[in-house]
Every structure is written in structure tokens, then in C-alpha cells.
Image (cartoon, grey):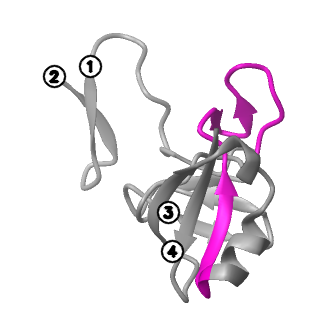
Amino acid sequence: MSHFAKLDENNMVVAVFRGRQEDDGREAELSAQTGERYVQTSYNTRGGIHLTGGQPLRKNYAGIGYFYDQNRDAFIPPQPFPSWILDEQSCQWQPPIPYPIDGLHWWNEQTQEWIAE
């Protein structure tokens, strides 16, 4: 099954559509037919890894609000906090302090720390 992200003029994802398997690789044709910009995305790709062992596509499955970076050929999610840094390999945002391994936590941007629930 193919999936396509519809982009606005700033390369922001405004919608994601499921296509037919035979549409795989036909993003240029789809864009030409509709006059809108579509870029294929892979439902099984997260952080540059294909979850079922296949070929990863564009680092991350696109979502509304994601940015399509043409230079990286990657979908990048919105930055969750100003202090978080983009990991160039995965194109995912990383906190300045790793997530604790014990229990549930939430990020406090003001104090720059994880707070236990």
C-alpha cells in the first residue's frame, strides 16, 4: 500500500493519503495530474529504519505538520521544545538530556529536566 503526503508551498505536510499499491513511486505523476505537490512516504519508516526490514523511505512516516526537507529527502516532525536538537541520522528531535529509563516522565522546558509522573 502506498502513502503520499500533500505539501503546501512551504513544504509543510497538510494531509496524508493512502494510495493503491500500483501508485508506488508515482508521486511526480500524481502531482502533475492534480497540480498539487505530493511526496511518497512509508508507513513503516521511523527514524530512518524500516520497521519490517524493508527499505526505509524519507527517514519518517509523514504526519500533518511535518516538514519535508528536500536537501535531506526526509520528513521531519515538529520540534517539540526549543531546546531539543535534530538528530541528523534519524531526523527526529532529541532532548538535551536522555529520557530516564525508570517510569513515566515529562519534559520541563523551563528547568531543562525530566519530571517523574
- Would you place residue 84 above or below residue 114 in this image? below
Please identify the quarter of the rendering in which residue 68 is found: bottom right
Left or right placement of residue 59 versus residue 10 in this view: right
Q: Are marks 1 and 3 in contact (CB under 8 Å)?
A: no
For numbered disc 3, what is the local secondary structure?
loop
Residue 86: image location, x then y, percent: 61, 55
**Distance CA(mark 1)–CA(mark 3):** 26 Å
**Distance CA(mark 1)–CA(mark 2):** 6 Å
Left or right placement of residue 80 versus residue 11 in this view: left
The residue at 61%/88% (across/down) is 35
Q: Are marks 4 and 1 in contact (CB under 8 Å)?
A: no
For numbered disc 2, what is the local secondary structure?
loop
**Distance CA(mark 4)–CA(mark 1):** 31 Å
* Residue behind mark 4: 12
The stretch of residues the image draws in magenta is: 34-57
Q: Are marks 1 and 2 in contact (CB under 8 Å)?
A: yes
* Residue behind mark 1: 104
The amino acid marked with disc number 1 is Leu
* Residue behind mark 3: 66
The amino acid marked with disc number 3 is Tyr
Residue 30: image location, x then y, percent: 69, 71
Comparing marks 2 and 3, which lies closer to the viewer? 3
* Residue behind mark 2: 117
**Distance CA(mark 3)–CA(mark 4):** 6 Å
The residue at 67%/23% (across/down) is 51
Q: Are marks 3 and 4 in contact (CB under 8 Å)?
A: yes
